[in-house]
Image: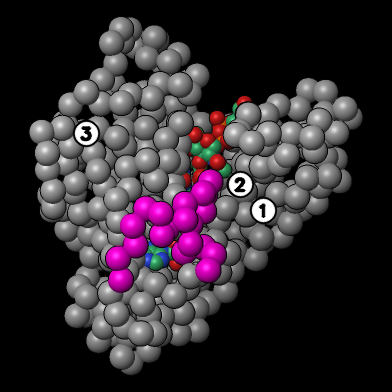
Amino acid sequence: MRQNVSLKPYNTFGLTAFAERFAEGDSIEGLLDLLEKEQPALILGGGSNVLLTQNIHGLVIKNNFKEKTIVAETEDTVQVRFGAGENWHECVLWCLEQGYGGIENLSLIPGTIGAAPMQNIGAYGVELQQVFVELEAVHLQEKEVRTFDNKECMFGYRDSVFKGEFKGQYFIVSVTLQLTKHSHKLDISYGAIQQTLEQAGVQTPDIKAISNAVIRIRSGKLPDPAKIGNAGSFFKNPVMAKSQFEVIQMKHPDIICYDLPEEHVKVPAGWLIEQCGWKGKRIGNTGTHINQALVLVNHGNATGQEILQTAYQIQDAVHDKFKILLTPEVNVV
Ligand code: FAD
Ligand code: EPU
């Protein structure tokens, strides 16, 4: 265990905050030992979806569980259990090397395997829940290992039971995914993927071609945290009833949306923010990304509090103009 550790290298916003105590958890026994002494104030994976607004008074446990085990296999599918501390994108690349399909659309998402179920990561038409079998998690107070299947995780858009009812109660230690060995279900429904494949001259895409296309699209519009601090989309795309959307549309005829089941729509928050004049805007050391207004950035020496204040200003601007309240996707600590 280390004392007074800077978390700057452990969060992709690149924010300076200190952990009173800092330890790494890489086995259930080691984790249980830590929990005997103290409950964690914060569990950290890759720190790519947190906004640290203060020092952490207490223990930060960095998840470092490593494992890749094939736990079940048929002629068509394979189930792989990944240690929660494995890097998500490295696991995607590993799957591609093995010829396993299912997560190619989720290429280049930063962070760990263990955080992926927290918000049911998604991109380019695919969400984690489509390949998720189960996870193992340690209850922080009871100190018991429990398995959650797909249904028990209560996945939704950027949501799970771990952000709701069980918030702050479990440490996820492994995640099992079911992947296809052949006859992969390719999803190229997201417009930009088709265009990018066409530009690359790919006639019959395979899982590697889709991964490459996704990597190319993402690299073009999302800032690389190694170069400019950010945590991806800061807010969720608001979901509302179609009837509510139609009322807003009367005043703002250009507004765009994506249809969802049961007469609901999703409105791209990036578009709303851009319409409020916030795309690429800078306030001191904070602002939004020049190519993606939904991504808040740290231009250098911003504090978490400064980024939070900017987020509030954006929320107010969008609410004033559209009467829509944006809710953060990033976990504010
Ligand atoms: P962290 O930021 O470390 O933690 C996130 C939350 O989960 C915190 O509340 C933390 O306490 C909790 N947590 C972490 N690990 C555990 C664990 N083992 N057990 C219990 N609780 C835990 N997300 C998407 O869904 N789609 C995208 O396309 C996407 N693109 C992104 C692009 C960029 C450039 C960046 C910076 C982020 C992007 N994100 C995206 C957000 C982020 O990558 C994901 O949310 C990712 O799953 C976070 O993983 P992490 O390990 O960094 O989590
Ligand atoms: N748009 C604008 N201005 C902007 C940004 C976007 O007008 O500044 C418009 C785009 O033109 C497009 C629409 O908004 O019509 C959607 O934009 P984009 O395809 O870039 O996706 P997004 O809705 O902004 C979501 C996810 C991303 C994910 C991409 C791809 C959320 C909150 N974000 O972004 O996830 O990678 O789709 O599937 O759902 C993340 O969660 O951190 C993240 C990056």
Residue holding disc 1? 327
* Observer-nearest of 329 and 7: 329
Density class for disc 3 (Cα within 10 Å; few <14, some 14-19, many ≥20) is many
Cα separation, mark 2 vs mark 3, equals: 30 Å
Q: Position of residue 46 (x, y in %)?
A: 37, 58
Provide the secondary structure element on which disc 1 rests: loop
Q: Is residue 303 magenta?
A: no
* Observer-nearest of 304 and 26: 26
Q: Position of residue 158 (x, y in %)?
A: 52, 49
Residue 180, label in figure: 3
**Does the numbered disc 2 mark a residue whose Cβ is under 8 Å from ligand 2?**
yes
Magenta-highlighted residues: 146-165
Residue holding disc 2? 236
Provide the secondary structure element on which disc 2 rests: loop
Q: Position of residue 289 (x, y in %)?
A: 60, 39
Cα separation, mark 2 vs mark 1, equals: 6 Å
**Does the numbered disc 3 mark a residue whose Cβ is under 8 Å from ligand 2?**
no
* Observer-nearest of 124 and 258: 258
